[in-house]
Image (tube, rainbow, N blue to C red):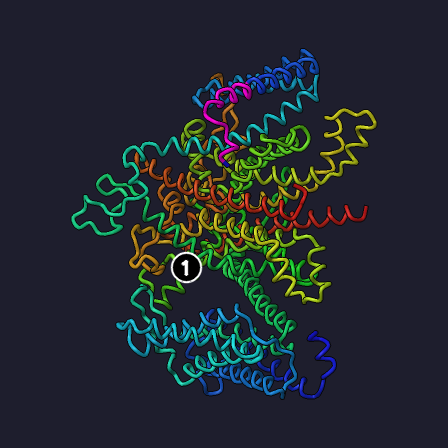
């Protein structure tokens, strides 16, 4: 490990050679581009990129003149398409790719930008404060949202954690069982019914789940289990778990399907039963993919908004003990944004953006983690990557 | 190996064992279904069947299952029933049983000794170790039946004798909720029957490898069955509750269509819930027309924004770009966009688009935000579709001297179109039901009294944007947003429906739209796949 690192003295030289190499490559590319492309096409490329850049900058500045570079772009593109269709198409597809990446970049930038005032006002307390000293009797978890200039996301983070844990406890085992069933056990006819059924489950809008949760599940828990309020973390977590199920099933099933058939056939040829093959060969081989599915499911559960917004009570605080999922408290990171985002302003709005940042970072970690795990599995199985 | 033994020694005894296990399985299924009926409150807790309260009946079911299992297990051990068990049930089974028995021990401890004592912990530990050893030490036929049978007999006995009954309530100190026996019993019985079915399934196949397979399959099968049952229930709830609202005032020939210029009225189908405004003074039966039109505009805008972008990016990534750092970044960005929570898109629209475009909630911002959400799905599916086009097609085209772009345009894209279209339809089904971002950037009044009039409100101005459209820049309603605002608003303005009734009707319309799109998507996928295989 230590030998492979260059010593400090060599570092500038290394950097310089890398920079020259990169510059050389760019020069070469420019020369190639120059010799392969007609002058008119080069002019078109320049005009197209210039007008798109101007459009973006003017739009960012909120100028009413944004329409002019748009028209310039359309005109250039129109002429270019007529004269140099291949070059125009290449430029256009490149632009669309850049646009896709820049949308994510813009999302990150604006979330961070808008949450700056709240972070400046509260500092790290925004994510850690659990007591409000401004209150008469500073109880744990009380008055942390807008009382005496205190904005703390801790009650919402706890709420998200509770609902996500409950949802995962439901979605992970049932989802894995479903994936095993669809990919290994079910005969072809059954699979052709079950699989679209599960995809359909993913397609039902979340607000519909929320409406059913509100009118049926919440009422059930209130009447039968005597919960202090209509709407608890447990009921919402239950519904979110059902909603996260299809994600787990689909991704985990893909992973089990990706386990090469010869491995399974080998095990069967050794005389093991189908279940022994599934249990000792297929699931261990596809385990990374299955866990990627579970991670994605957790991400979905965390980001789920509407069902929780409709079902929860929007009372902020810490249940005591912390794992009491039937308490009268109910607010998560997503629900606070959806419920208060419409009429918030100033530092309140900024705090909501900070909630968005927390959510985004958590989900992004889960997403990249699951991509990495999946990538490793395909590497191990010797897939096409 | 187990197969060989069984065929050799197939005697009358083995059928007795089979029959007995089959009977136990049947009892388990009946009890399982019965407890779900109770949980879903289709059967009243106080009801009696043949003079027995239903709760006690569930207890009897458990006792029967437990007794049958014990009988089969012992019979197999004493070789009355012909089986092929392994030497032990295995450590995993032992661990599960240990955990179950520990929970049971904890419950017994708290119930018998009272909440105040800490004694429940050692009791639970003793029970847990007992359960583990009881499962692992004996031969498999005993180890995987007797511990189950004991749990079921204990639980069933408790329920039958009324130890846990309808009147009994468990209110632990750590929870704000109370757990009444009338709900706790069915829940426990559901888990008990699952356990019993696993054990009976094993016994039916004579234990050993075959038995373990049967047990696992019964368990997984019932879990999946329950999952699909939940889906069916959800849809059934919406349909039964929403149908009456949706069909209010409908008739096949009740309406009148006046033919223009001639002035003759023709009988015409009438569908007020779909064709009427939601608010407004003169509306007799409020409908969801503004929401339907709003959803159509949203989907139209999102598709016309996201589809060209997504397909363009997919073409660049697959045909032009070389695999490397750049494509990796795009892939990560695409997957990131795909997993970004919808509410975060709403926040982004609120911060970036709203102040620059309309200064408030508006249709066009809603279209763009939904377009952002649709983009990664279009990109991923069309990229897969383009990658699936065989290289032979490209090579053949290149061999004819066709340029790269012409190959893409006339060979690759047409071949990839079916997959792309399917992906777009499925994605549209998804964004049509999306609500969270609409709350922040789109939604208008909860009961709109006019539909957004986009087509006729384009106006030309001398000022810089030159073309403006008042309707596109103002808020509107969409089906999911309508459902949300109906739920959260107080009282419904018309007497004919309550909020909940109107909500169920809206939910049904939304479900029909989404399921319809979904069915078209899946249908087109099947159609194209079949076509591909026949060619």
Residue drawn at x 30%, y 50% as measured from the top left: A316
- State the extent of the magenta-drawn residues as a range: A2-19
Vertical position of residue B38 compared to residue A8: above or below: below
Q: Answer whether residue A268 is visible to the viewer in this image.
A: yes
Mark 1, secondary structure of its residue:
helix
A121 vs A78, left or right, is: left
Residue drawn at x 26%, y 45% as measured from the top left: A144
A179 vs A116, left or right, is: right
Q: Which residue is mark 1?
A: A235
Q: Quadrant of residue B225?
A: bottom right
Vertical position of residue A63 compared to residue B299: above or below: above
Q: Position of residue A224 (x, y in %)?
A: 38, 68
Q: Nearer the viewer, residue A56 or B517?
A: A56
Q: Chain of mark 1?
A: A
**Which corner quadrant holds the C terminus of chain A?**
top right
Q: Nearer the viewer, residue A255 or A57?
A: A255
For this orientation, the residue located farthest to the front is: A3
B521 vs B274, left or right, is: right
Per the picture, the main secondary structure of the magenta-coloured stretch is helix
For this orientation, the residue located farthest to the right is: B400
Residue drawn at x 55%, y 43% as measured from the top left: A371
């Amino acid at each position: 490990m230590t030998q492979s690192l260059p010593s400090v003295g060599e570092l500038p030289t290394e950097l310089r050679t890398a920079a020259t190499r990169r510059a050389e490559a760019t020069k070469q590319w420019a020369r190639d581009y120059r010799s392969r492309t007609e002058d008119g096409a080069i002019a078109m490329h320049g005009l197209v990129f210039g007008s798109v850049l101007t459009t973006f900058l003017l739009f960012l500045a909120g100028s009413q003149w944004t329409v002019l570079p748009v028209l310039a772009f359309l005109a250039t593109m129109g002429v270019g398409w007529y004269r140099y269709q291949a070059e125009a198409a290449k430029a256009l597809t490149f632009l669309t790719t850049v646009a896709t990446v820049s949308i994510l970049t813009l999302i990150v930038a604006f979330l961070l930008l808008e949450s700056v005032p709240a972070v400046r006002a509260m500092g790290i307390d925004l994510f850690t404060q659990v007591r409000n000293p401004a209150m008469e009797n500073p109880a744990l978890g009380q008055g942390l949202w807008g009382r005496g200039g205190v904005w703390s996301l801790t009650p919402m983070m706890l709420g998200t954690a509770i609902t996500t844990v409950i949802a995962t406890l439901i979605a992970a085992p049932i989802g894995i069982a479903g994936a095993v069933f669809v990919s290994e056990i079910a005969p072809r006819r059954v699979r052709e019914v079950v699989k679209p059924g599960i995809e359909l489950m993913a397609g039902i809008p979340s607000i519909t789940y929320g409406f059913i949760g509100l009118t049926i599940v919440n009422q059930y828990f209130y009447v039968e289990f005597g919960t202090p309020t209509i709407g608890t973390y447990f009921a919402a977590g239950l519904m979110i778990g059902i909603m996260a199920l299809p994600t787990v099933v689909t991704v985990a099933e893909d992973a089990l399907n990706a386990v090469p058939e010869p491995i399974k056939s080998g095990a069967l040829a050794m005389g093991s039963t189908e279940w022994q093959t599934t249990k000792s060969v297929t699931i261990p081989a596809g385990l990374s993919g299955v866990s990627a599915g579970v991670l994605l499911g957790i991400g979905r559960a965390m980001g789920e908004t509407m069902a929780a917004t409709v079902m929860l009570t929007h009372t902020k605080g810490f249940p005591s003990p912390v794992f009491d999922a039937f308490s009268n408290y109910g607010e998560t990171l997503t629900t606070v944004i959806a419920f208060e985002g419409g009429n918030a302003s100033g530092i309140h709005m900024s705090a909501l953006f900070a909630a968005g940042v927390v959510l985004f970072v958590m989900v992004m970690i889960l997403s990249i983690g699951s991509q990495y795990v999946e990538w490793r599995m395909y590497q191990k199985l010797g897939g096409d990557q | 190996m187990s197969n060989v033994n069984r065929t050799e020694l197939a005697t009358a005894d083995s059928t007795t064992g089979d029959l007995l296990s089959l009977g136990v399985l049947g009892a388990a299924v009946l009890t399982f279904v019965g407890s779900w009926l109770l949980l879903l409150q289709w059967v009243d807790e106080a009801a009696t069947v043949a003079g027995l309260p239903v709760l006690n009946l569930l207890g009897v079911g458990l006792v029967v299952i437990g007794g049958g299992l014990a009988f089969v297990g012992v019979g197999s051990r004493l070789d009355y029933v012909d089986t092929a068990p392994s030497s032990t049930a295995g450590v995993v089974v032992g661990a599960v049983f240990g955990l179950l028995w520990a929970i049971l021990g904890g419950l017994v401890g708290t119930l018998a000794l009272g909440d105040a004592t800490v004694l429940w912990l050692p009791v639970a530990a003793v029970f847990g170790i007992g359960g583990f050893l009881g499962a692992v030490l004996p031969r498999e036929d005993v180890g995987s039946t007797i511990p189950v049978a004991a749990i079921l007999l204990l639980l069933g006995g408790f329920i039958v004798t009324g130890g846990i009954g309808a009147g009994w309530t468990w209110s632990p100190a750590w929870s704000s909720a109370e757990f009444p026996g009338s709900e706790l019993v069915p829940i426990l019985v559901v888990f008990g029957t699952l356990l019993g079915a696993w054990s009976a399934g094993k016994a039916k196949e004579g234990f050993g490898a075959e038995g373990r397979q049967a047990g696992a399959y019964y368990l997984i099968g019932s879990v999946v069955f329950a999952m699909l049952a939940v889906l069916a229930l959800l849809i059934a709830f919406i349909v039964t509750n929403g149908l009456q609202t949706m069909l209010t005032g409908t008739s096949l020939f009740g309406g009148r269509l006046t033919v223009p210029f001639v002035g003759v009225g023709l009988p015409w189908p009438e569908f007020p819930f779909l064709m009427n405004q939601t608010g407004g003074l003169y509306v007799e039966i409020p409908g969801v027309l503004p929401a339907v039109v709003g959803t159509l505009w949203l989907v139209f805008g999102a598709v016309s924004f996201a589809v060209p972008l997504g397909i363009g990016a997919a073409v660049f990534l697959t045909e032009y770009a070389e695999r490397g750092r750049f494509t990796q970044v795009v892939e990560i960005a695409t997957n990131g966009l795909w997993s970004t929570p919808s509410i975060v898109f709403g926040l982004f629209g609120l911060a970036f688009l709203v102040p620059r475009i309309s200064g408030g909630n508006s249709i066009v911002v809603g279209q763009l935000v939904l377009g952002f959400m649709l983009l990664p799905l279009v990109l991923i599916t069309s990229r897969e579709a383009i990658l699936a086009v065989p290289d032979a097609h490209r090579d053949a085209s290149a061999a004819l001297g066709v340029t790269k772009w012409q190959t893409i345009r006339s060979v690759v894209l047409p071949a990839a179109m079916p997959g792309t279209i399917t992906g777009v339809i499925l994605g549209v089904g998804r964004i049509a039901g999306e609500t969270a971002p609409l709350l922040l950037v789109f939604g208008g009044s909860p009961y709109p009294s006019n539909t957004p009039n986009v087509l006729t409100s384009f106006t030309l101005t001398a000022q810089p944007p030159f073309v403006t459209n008042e309707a596109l820049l103002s808020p509107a309603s969409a089906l999911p947003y309508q459902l949300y605002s109906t739920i959260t608003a107080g009282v419904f303005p018309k007497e004919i429906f309550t909020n909940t009734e109107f909500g169920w009707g809206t939910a049904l319309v939304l479900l029909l739209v989404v399921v319809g799109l979904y069915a078209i998507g899946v249908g087109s996928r099947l159609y194209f796949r079949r076509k591909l295989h026949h060619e």
